[in-house]
Image (cartoon, rainbow, N blue to C red):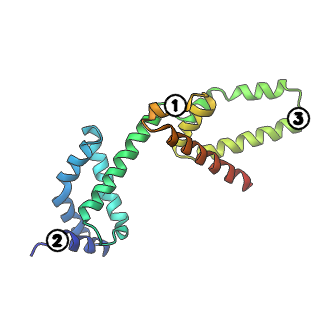
Amino acid sequence: MAHTDHDLMLLVQSREGEALGALKRRHEGTLRLHLLRYVDSGDVQDLLQETWVRAWERCEQWDGSGAPLAWLLRIATNLALNHIRDSRLRAHGNIDDEIDEYADEPTRQLEASGLGVPEQAHLRDRAERLLELIAQMPEDRQALLRMARLEQRRLQDIAAQAGVPVGTIKSRLHSTTRWLAARWDDD
């Protein structure tokens, strides 16, 4: 007797890998076509694989109230949208590259500032701490900081480039700044 999708998901939640394989055989084509609506065909296989990995790792999040296919489509959609967003922001490089390019400039400025050695050391320590915190951020947030703060680009331009509303960029920038401030205060 063939299992329903609901039955298969319950088995997946019991960690039966064969049940996930059955779901995969049943819905792989649908998920592939769905992902093709969002991304190029070259990215579909990776996103499809990640969809199945997430479904396995987070199967307990399916609460049984909806169709398993709808839950799988939601996972695939979220992965595709994240991929699109990250690709747009990643196209502009990593903030580490930008920071490395100008790393010597602050040192020259500090030495020319007339500050004493202890003050220079304190400012260097603070700058290193800031760079450590930034390195802990996701790449898209690093790119956002680079574009908004280092390059001083207009938020409208960043939004247009990322394909999102200006309000979204403002919100992300605000949450990124709050994230930095909260970790800065922890020290």
Where disc 1 sits, the SS reads helix
Tell me the quadrant of the picture where the C terminus can be found. Answer: bottom right
Residue position for label 2? 4
Q: Residue at x 27, y 74 (%)?
A: 10
Q: Label 2 vs label 1: CA separation?
A: 48 Å
Where disc 2 sits, the SS reads loop
The image shows residue 74 at horizontal and vertical percentages of 32, 56
Rendered view: 108 above or below 40: above
Closest to the observer, 76 or 158:
158
Residue position for label 3? 117
Closest to the observer, 168 or 4:
168
The image shows residue 69 at horizontal and vertical percentages of 24, 61
Mark 3 or mark 2: which comes first in sequence? 2
Rendered view: 119 above or below 24: above
Tell me the quadrant of the picture where the N terminus can be found. Answer: bottom left
Q: In which quarter of the image is residue 100?
A: top right
Mark 3 or mark 1: which comes first in sequence? 3
Q: What numbered label is drawn on residue 77? A: none
Closest to the observer, 181 or 41:
181
Q: Residue at x 82, y 41 (%)?
A: 122
Question: Callout 1 environment at 10 Å: few (<14), some (14 to 19), or many (20+)?
Answer: some
Mark 2–mark 1 CB contact (< 8 Å): no
Residue position for label 1? 156
Residue 162 appears left or right of 25: right
Residue type pointed to by label 3:
Val
Rendered view: 63 above or below 93: below
Mark 3–mark 1 CB contact (< 8 Å): no
Q: Which residue is drawn at 23% across and 52% down?
A: 31
Residue type pointed to by label 2:
Thr
Where disc 3 sits, the SS reads helix
Residue type pointed to by label 1:
Gln
Which of labels 3 and 1 is toward the front?
A: 1
